[in-house]
Image: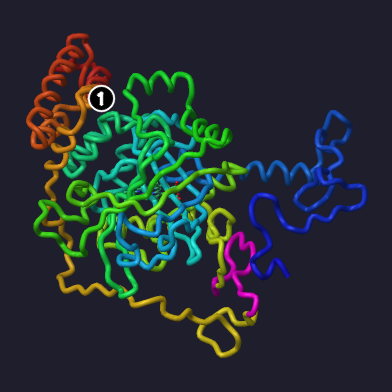
Amino acid sequence: DEINNGTAVTGVGGPADQRLAEGEQETTLTNRQGHPITDNQNIRTIGNRGPSTLENYHFLEKISHFDREKIPERVVHARGAGAHGYFEAYGKVGEESVAKYTRAKLFQEAGKKTPVFVRFSTVVHGVHSPETLRDPRGFAVKFYTEDGNWDLVGNNLKIFFIRDPLKFPDMVHAFRPDPVSGVQNMERMFDFLSNSPEATHMVTFLFSPWGIPANYREMQGSGVNTYKWVNANGEGVLIKYHWEPIKTGIRNLTQNEANDIQGKNYSHATQDLYEAIERGDYPEWELSVQILSDDEHPELDFDPLDPTKLWDHEKFPFLPVGKMVLNKNPENYFAEVEQAAFGTGVLVDGLDFSDDKLLQGRTFSYSDTQRHRVGTNYLQLPVNAPKKHVATNQRDGQMTYFVDRAPGQNPHVNYEPSSLGGLQEAPPRGREHEPAYNAKLVREKIDRPNDFGQAGDTYRKFEPWEKDELISNLVNNLKICKPVIRDKMVEYFTQADAEYGRRVAEELGKAVASSEHMGTVQNREGAGKAEQAGRKTD
Ligand code: HEM
């Protein structure tokens, strides 16, 4: 029976059993009880002027379903677009055998294809916010492998603001709209950033044109965090993942270009992706990895697990492992894109976690929020379910859609171990990767924070127009901030690169002087309170 073995429903089309009652056609409108609807224009009333009666089942079902059409939006990355496609392995890593480093099956053979679903997103604002905002872009890929799902939940930028997950809720609060006014306030954002020196590198990327990719097709992706690959002997190496757009190259926008687009279109990136796929111009990305041996690397001036750092690609080359093609739009935005659930914990055999603390914090957060946002049984939805055998002893919970039972499983045995025909553990997949630890349990920051060195390198690598944009974007946002915040930020930029700091300081000085000249007051809140109290501001 289909309901019990978990094969009942795939995709958007609904249950397999579509028998027609007499007089019905395939397109006959019904309610969800299967009752044909003969009148979808008028509710039942006493006389045609009303009042209505409470037994209008069709109306009640329709309106109460409508009342529940929205689910909580993602707490971050709410605005997004998605597409289906495939990943095709090259069967090697650079010029070497991939098996030397990982036993993950999806990478082993040249030409092997794995279906994927991808969701791109912006981060800070809500589900209908403009796609032109200065923000990292999410780049989340779900690989439906033969060994179960692998999610590579990345961003377009290769680094992150913070390195400790304890700071993430504060960071997001500071970036989001003010809890009182409901309006984003850059002073709150820079208040947090000026007290988080490790963010200086990310700020340097974000306020440059790299903070507004032209659209989703013309941008890179990166796993940001460090992961591991594990081979058949259980030996691990450190890995960073990178996606490069193959067909288009990378294109970023100046603030003025973004403003122009935003004046006309709030959805230019979603539209661009959808239309490209509709016309058969399928976007492609190449996946590369950087590999480092699994140790602390005392020779580097930073910790390789620190997500605020790049691994220099001249020392640690990008080694291609495959390419991804997106060739199918979703059939339904809500069912697929909105309900898609990606998480950093979702790895397959041959892929592993590194000790990166941020990564471990993320790994709890994703499935936790998805049990709240989508529901306990979110993994039974077609977009999230693996495209392979699934058999668990998990039962029940809201919206249980089918029973995750193996066809040969004794239905009475929903526990393990058992001798009565229940599920059994799989045989070992290869040698376990078993890193050894001998350290004190502490609350401490890492030893080589080096908060400014790479921010300076990144600034110096920008082209002149990118530097100009960076300075003007920073100044336009910092000029509304209190001096204590401006001064700290300038100090960080100066530590990164003397010219960088000097240019921000000079331009900021001019911008502040001219806005004071125009009679605007720096501390608006303070000024307002003083005026209300009938006192002069100083
Ligand atoms: C989405 C948490 C850092 C990339 C999310 C969501 C949460 C979250 C709760 C919403 C998930 C959902 O509703 O399905 C965190 C925490 C972080 C962190 C706690 C740090 C401690 C990062 C980093 C990256 C990233 C470093 C980039 C590598 C994404 C992406 C999504 C997302 C791409 C959207 C996934 C989708 O399209 O559904 N994050 N995040 N996050 N995060 Fe993070």
Instruction: Relative to 428, say whether 5 is above or below.
Output: above
Looking at the rendering, the stretch of residues picked out in magenta corresponds to 392-408
The answer to whether residue 369 shows anywhere in this view is: no
Residue at the image position 32 percent from the left and 23 percent from the top: 255
- Residue type at mark 1 is Asn
Magenta stretch contains residue 404: yes
Residue 215 x %, y %: 42, 32
Q: Which residue is mark 1?
A: 473
**Residue at x 59% of width, y 47% of height:** 335
* Image position of 225 (left or right of 283): left
As helix, strand or loop, the secondary structure at mark 1 comes to helix
- Is residue 129 located in the magenta-colored stretch of the structure? no
Q: Residue furthest front?
A: 95
Name the residue at the top extreme.
Answer: 518
The residue nearer to you, when weighing 81 against 484, is 81
Q: Image point 78% across, 53% down: which residue?
A: 33
The image quarter containing residue 75 is top left
